[in-house]
Amino acid sequence: MSSPILEVSNLNVRFSTPDGEVHAVKDASFTIGESECLGVVGESGSGKSQMFLATMGILSGNGKASGSVKYRGQELIGATDRQLNKLRGSKITMIFQDPLTCLTPHMTAGAQIVEALQVHTKLPRDEAEKRALEMLELVRIPEAKRRMRQYPHELSGGMRQRVMIAMATACGPDLLIADEPTTALDVTVQAQILEIMRDLKVELKTAIVLISHDMGVIAGVSDRVAVMRRGEIVETGPVDDIFYKPRHDYTKMLLDSMPRLDRPDRDGEARLPPPKSDQTVLEVRDLKVHFPVRGTGFFAKTKPLRAVDGVSFDLREGETLGIVGESGCGKSTLARAVLKLLPKTDGTVVWMTRDLNAISDSDQRRLRKELQIVFQDPLASLDPRRTIGESIAEPLRTLQPGLSRDAVRAKVRATMEQVGLDPAWLNRYPHEFSGGQNQRVGIARAMIVEPKLVICDEAVSALDVSIQSQIVDLILKLQTEFGMSMLFISHDLSVVRQISHRVMVLYLGRIVELADRETIYKDARHPYTKALISAVPVPDPKFERSKTHVKLTGDLPSPLDTRAQLNFLKSKLIDDPDAEQYRPALIEVTPGHYVAEHD
Amino acid sequence: MSVPFSAADTEAAMGDIVQGRSLWDDALRRLMRNRAAVISVVILFVIAVAAVIGPYFLAYDYSFQDYTVVSCAPDWWPDTTVMCNAGGTHWFGTDSIGRDLVARTLYGARVSLAVGLIATLVSLVIGVAYGAIAGYVGGRIDELMMRFVDVLYSIPYIFLVIILMVIFNRNFFLLFVAIGAVEWLTMARIVRGQTLSIKQKEFIEAARAGGVGAFGIITRHIIPNVFGPVVVYVTLTVPASILAESFLSFLGLGIQEPLTSWGVLISDGANQMETAPWMLLFPAAFMTVTLFCFNFIGDGLRDALDPKDR
């Protein structure tokens, strides 16, 4: 290896906070060579981002870095802002997780790239503009000329991240630091962005630091990997060694807890129990939820936003149906409509032979007792001013008002034990717990009334992988014990595979494919399902390198456009955004395997 | 509403229960570290205690007139020409009809603090209930309720008070109503705004999924969570009410003789500012200190409740 671009030795980062000093990075040392990609992996709070913010000299005000960071022999720690500004944005650049907050809202995408170029290269304006256009084409933005004149809010998340990458690479940097660049994006878009990054490495000979919590993302792009835990780099090595011959226990644990698309059950962990019986408990027929959206202008027509547009499925007793799809496909809306938390526009939902349309108020209460939901954000779904004991007890106290205080308390303690929480904690508050513990509280709150159906709305998506696997195990254990049915909603196909008996793929409010969990991954028929599965990064570098991607170009279209649902059935398309379109029908290709019509 | 797991419930059998730190505990801890706020609390406490029990220990009643000591400066006053050797008992001097200013200032404090607190309480109760309902129910009802607030806002409140006074005669009770009726408008707007943002949070949805009705959600989940900004606003409403009362009294629309308030005393004192400045000085100093204290407490509370926004 030639002389390294960046040489970090004994880097320490400390933050002084009102609650004492936090040692965020402890004695980190590593090097990055020419056009090399270093993957940095670790869970939240492991200090992986702070390490590189310190490298760039942009720690927040209460942070202090010590040690040594050398860029081509030049010491960066303790350098003045003037010296650093010569490097920042031209030789060392950075892209962040949220591309919306990183772009100035009042400047067009083109103007921002031109500005970055002019600050560092003194190119005349027209040449800078030409270069900006080239960069946008390099990151494969369709209709780059038009996009140049658009403002950030007019671009989708994937487009914005591309603009950020174009901006970061415009001056021909030696080192590009990408901090969770794809975490906020859908899998198909993530696959596109990762593809671009792989190409940049080859075409521009840029060294890349890819910071991610996702081992799959790291596996596909990196040459070398550094694993971080609690501020320390616990293991570094070539990507194959890390993945196939991990030495540190923590690396092994991370790899083990990753849900993998190619491995339905993790070894020795809780297994998916078989469905309790063949009896159908939930029957959804042609469910539609439309939201009226007003156009702009004084006499604008309101158009329906078809969030859920004719979804039908059955759920058996003790069965888990996984619902996957990208953002905006209507999966959460579907869950809320089933629970009657949102009014539905049309269709029927029959729960245990009772039509939920024609239900009386007293039945409504019993219904709430049988149908419960677990939310995505563990902290946001708990009232910050109430103790977790109060939060867990709330459904019990409203749904069974006759229960005595002692009975409620005993039940709360029992439930807390079932979900792996110490009952002694019942007087503590959500902000005193970690995300995983709070999610257990959320699960306890749903389970305390012994529901027959639990809807998990992205219940594990906000958690770190090691915590995620624990929560998945807990959910499986509870299902084995109580035999409840579940709707498990997630954008993460690997988790869904572990936890569901059958999987339903939604695209813009409609089912595109529905099959049992083996079939859908091994014998996907619909092009969208295929693209979705191929886009999921697998923590297996050799597999990732050899894998051929089924590509979807561009972003998810707007659900307001009635043409969008026919993206895979162009032959029946009427090219008018307002026209009533043909609805692709579901066809049963083999028993229990339904696929929407497609070309 | 009963809280099932209060500290009082934890019997010996459950001695192992860990008591958590609530967000209020945290806020209190941060407030205690704010020196200005803590000093303000102490000063306010002293003024309040003096106002409540002070008058019982004084030699003079607030309405007792001693014509031998009209417009007398305190004994320690530097300008000896205006002193009339009252005998060392009129520490703040006397007013133009020979009443003791210590007694009147303390009595004025009672009235001013009472107006401030009661008017704020009125605005708190109406404003929080109104704002929370408008915000939670939303839609057309919210629209109607808030337009009603806008209409009330547009009525100049001095006219409102003058009209009320003319119709119902001057009356101590009316003062609370008049001031409270003005202050609750802002409170309702603040609470509605907060409610709108809290309504979007997942824990509200979780409560609905748990079968909790609208009343339970508003009282158990929304109001406790809007209380942070509300408490801050309350500490700013109290001085605003005191000021409003002073202003009305200054115009002659407030408290009637021989009752008094800081506003009345300041108004009287201002008339004789050149010949007898002590008549203005003492009530004005008390009021200024009180207002400062409330504002410091308000600032301290805001920092304590919202450490991120500092």
Image (cartoon, rainbow, N blue to C red):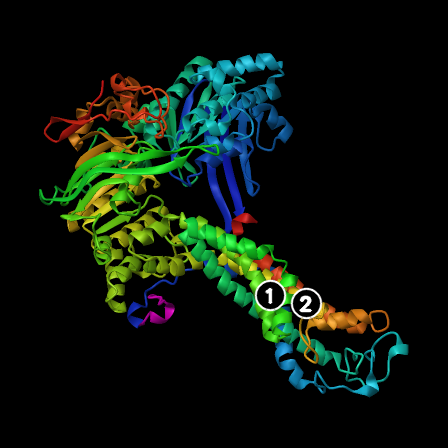
Q: Residue furthest front?
A: B167
In depth, the one of B130 and A440 nearer the eye is B130
What residue is shown with label 1?
B179
Q: Residue at x 44, y 59 (%)?
A: B223
- The amino acid type found where label 2 is placed reads Leu
Q: Going 82% across and 82% down the picture, which residue do you hit?
A: B70
Density class for disc 1 (Cα within 10 Å; few <14, some 14-19, many ≥20) is many
Tags 2 and 1 both on a single chain: yes
Question: Which residue has dot 2 on it?
Answer: B248
Along the viewing direction, whichever of A390 and A121 lies nearer the viewer: A390
Q: Position of residue B275 (x, y in %)?
A: 86, 72
Q: Residue drawn at (17%, 45%), measured in percent from left and top?
A: A350
Q: Magenta stretch containing residue B8, yes or no?
A: yes
Tag 1's secondary structure?
Answer: helix
Asked if marks 2 and 1 touch (Cβ < 8 Å), the reply is yes
**Which SS type dominates the magenta stretch?**
loop
Which image quarter: residue B132? bottom left
Residue A546 visible in the displayed image: yes
Please report, as a chain letter, where disc 2 is located: B
Amino acid type at circle 1 is Ile
Q: Which mark is residue A434?
A: none
| Left or right: where B73 falls relative to A501 | right
Left or right of B36: which side holds A341? left
- The local crowd at label 2, few if under 14, some if 14 to 19, many if 20 or more residues have their Cα within 10 Å, is many
Q: Which residues are magenta?
A: B1-11
**Callout 1: chain:** B
Give the quadrant of the N terminus of chain B: bottom left
Image height check: is B225 above or below A108?
Answer: below
Q: Residue furthest right?
A: B81
Vertical position of residue B165 compared to residue A148: above or below: below
On the image, the x and y values in percent for residue A598 come to: 22, 21
